[in-house]
Amino acid sequence: MQRDITTLFLEWKEKPERKPLIVRGARQTGKSYSITDFGKNHFKGQTHIINFEKRPDYSKIFELNFDIARIVQELELLLNSRIVAGQDLLFFDEIQACPKAIVSLRYFYEQLPALHIIAAGSLLEFALGDISFPVGRVHLVTMNPMTFREFLIATGKSLAAEVISEEPKALSETTHSMLTEALKKYFFIGGMPECVKTYVETNSMQSVIEIQTDLIETFRQDFSKYAGRADKTCLNSVLSNVPQNIGQQIKYSTLADGFANPTIKKAFELLETARLISRVKATSPAGLPLGAGSSGKKFKAIMLDIGLLSSLSGLSHSTEYMKTDLLAIFRGALAEQFVGQEIRAVSEGGLYYWAREARSSNAETDYLIEKQGKIIPIEVKSGSSGRLKSLHLLLDTFKNVESAIVLSDARYGHFAEQKITFVPLYFACAATRNS
């Protein structure tokens, strides 16, 4: 399946001062497939794949020293194939299973810079805490689930994918309805590549649900790899309960019964490290960077993937899918998850929102982004501008904020006097992209 990250891979490949590339991301987001496909289609020579989970014995090659000539020679012997710098791609998969291979990337950069080398791993951050990470000697990128644009391409709607990649604009009612219906499918299928592939091949939502259940079980099996870091039962509870709190400020006590807040906090942080959940921090729109004024205590969360959120939430597909208002599905939580997921896909920084600091105030906007050097508040909501009290309060209070975006299932509309643009949900990626 066509993935946007391939463009980034191509840019990396042609850089004269290229560093080894590490691709991070949760399990099953398509890292191995995309890298292997990239090697097959964009290199004259071979793609040499070392999977350290499948071949733990290869780890011993990196234990002797970091003489790259020796390491490459031994890899060639085991693979029975020459590794040619400048023509071949060397791919270290599941590199977290061999921490010294991570360290070796520094020496590949210093001793054999002509060799194209990509590493990928799930739960990579757990391994990074135990080694001397080659800071400045590698380039890090993150792979997320498929965006709505990628989903459209995979389901045969490549022209629609082009339209939603453009600057948001008014579209006909017919086109608007088609894109809204496609987005509703994405709400339930999500962007995990295996789920999308299964839907394309079977057109069966039930088959997708079965895959989602299997993926969630795979994530839970990984909990044993956090041994000594958090209580497994607590991890299970947090993973199950965060979906019930999408769009709300997180209170640890609501995520797991029978555990103290410090224990729940640790479980939450571990799931965050595993990239199954992402924190959305409260911050001030008073100035940039947004992270400078962010709060460590006040935050919301989104899940890795909207389809997995649907599955974990136990939504009744037969009931929820019949709703025509996307903002009504699961009390609006899927729409807020979708927007956060799209922002995360095009943003290198963290996720932020605004919550008024005044005592007893519940005024807040769903997200804050930086776009072209300006702060833009984002609301995910249906209804007219007159009902957007929190957004109007923000615009009145912070004069440096010159415009705002409301994402909903309504059609496009711009109201210059109110500094608000109404944008259909399917334009979320284009509307929030910092370009």
Image (cartoon, rainbow, N blue to C red):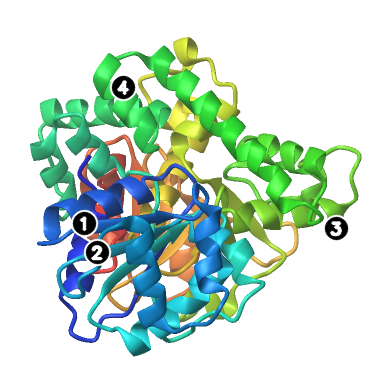
Q: The disc labelled 1 sits on which kind of residue?
A: Gly
CB under 8 Å between discs 1 and 2: yes
Q: Of callouts 1 and 3, which one flags the residue occurring earlier in the amino acid sequence?
A: 1
Closer-to-camera residue (241/222): 222
How far is disc 1 from disc 3 in space, using C-alphas?
Answer: 45 Å
Relative placement, left or right, of 173 versus 136 is left
Q: Of callouts 4 and 1, which one flags the residue occurring earlier in the amino acid sequence?
A: 1
Q: In which quarter of the image is the N terminus?
A: top left
Q: Callout 2: 10 Å neighbours few (<14), some, many (20+)? A: many
How far is disc 4 from disc 1 in space, using C-alphas?
Answer: 26 Å
Q: Of callouts 1 and 2, which one flags the residue occurring earlier in the amino acid sequence?
A: 1
On the image, numbered disc 1 is attached to which residue? 39
CB under 8 Å between discs 3 and 4: no
Closer-to-camera residue (409/289): 289
How far is disc 3 from disc 2 in space, using C-alphas?
Answer: 45 Å
On the image, numbered disc 3 is attached to which residue? 262
Q: Quadrant of residue 392?
A: bottom left
* Residue 168 drawn above or below residue 424: below
Q: Where is residue 240 in the image (x, y as percent from the top left)?
A: 68, 34
Which residue is found at the position 47% from the left and 15% from the top?
317
* Label 1 secondary element: helix
CB under 8 Å between discs 1 and 3: no
How far is disc 2 from disc 4 in space, using C-alphas?
Answer: 32 Å
On the image, numbered disc 4 is attached to which residue? 199
* Label 4 secondary element: helix
Q: Of callouts 2 and 4, which one flags the residue occurring earlier in the amino acid sequence?
A: 2
* Label 2 secondary element: strand
Q: The disc labelled 3 sits on which kind of residue?
A: Pro
- Please name which of the two marks, 3 or 4, marks the residue nearer to the observer: 4
CB under 8 Å between discs 4 and 1: no
